[in-house]
Amino acid sequence: MTTFFISQPMNGKTDEEIKADRSKCQAWLLKAFGTVTIVDSFIAEDPPKDCKNIGAWYLGESIKALARADVLVLWGDWINARGCLIEREVAIKYGIPVIENGGEG
């Protein structure tokens, strides 16, 4: 079974909006590929108190999760999200296949 990592824009979105987008992507993956496993990359914990760059901390946690995936799926308006662009670059450099615009324009 293939394990997918969903990369999606999160800046300015509520947890509920992020989870709703993720659910749409998961539904698309199930339709397109059948049975799939999704890496849980939703980071609920807060950065440590001494964190100097919260965005970089969250990105680091996401890249750790990406390492558990067979395929990266870029979802939604990923092209305008710094984190998604960096996750894409990491996947390409480390040989993880990438699906761009999965299920959405």
Image: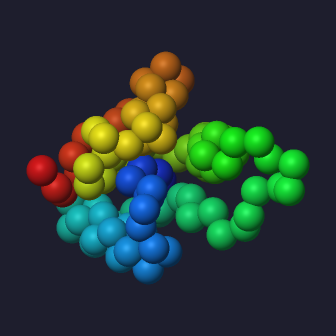
Eyeballing the image, is 67 above or below 6? above
Furthest-right residue in this view: 50
Identify the residue at image location x=63%, y=63%.
Answer: 43
Eyeballing the image, is 50 above or below 92? below
Residue 53 seen anywhere in this rendered image of the structure: yes
Q: Position of residue 100 (x, y in %)?
A: 25, 40
Quarter occupied by the N terminus: bottom left
**In this rendering, position of residue 5 left or right of residue 64:** left
Q: Position of residue 49 (x, y in %)?
A: 86, 56
Eyeballing the image, is 23 above or below 66? below
Eyeballing the image, is 105 above or below 80? below
Identify the residue at image location x=24%, y=65%.
Answer: 28
**In this rendering, position of residue 67 left or right of residue 77:** right
Q: Nearer the viewer, residue 61 or 27?
A: 61
Q: How is the image coloured?
A: rainbow
Furthest-left residue in this view: 105
Q: Position of residue 22 (x, y in %)?
A: 38, 67
Q: Position of residue 99 (x, y in %)?
A: 29, 41
How many marks are shown on the rendered structure? Answer: 0
Identify the residue at image location x=38%, y=74%.
Answer: 17
Furthest-bottom residue in this view: 16
Determine the image quadrant of residue 31. bottom left
Identify the residue at image location x=53%, y=23%.
Answer: 94
Q: Nearer the viewer, residue 48 or 35?
A: 48
Residue 1 seen anywhere in this rendered image of the structure: no
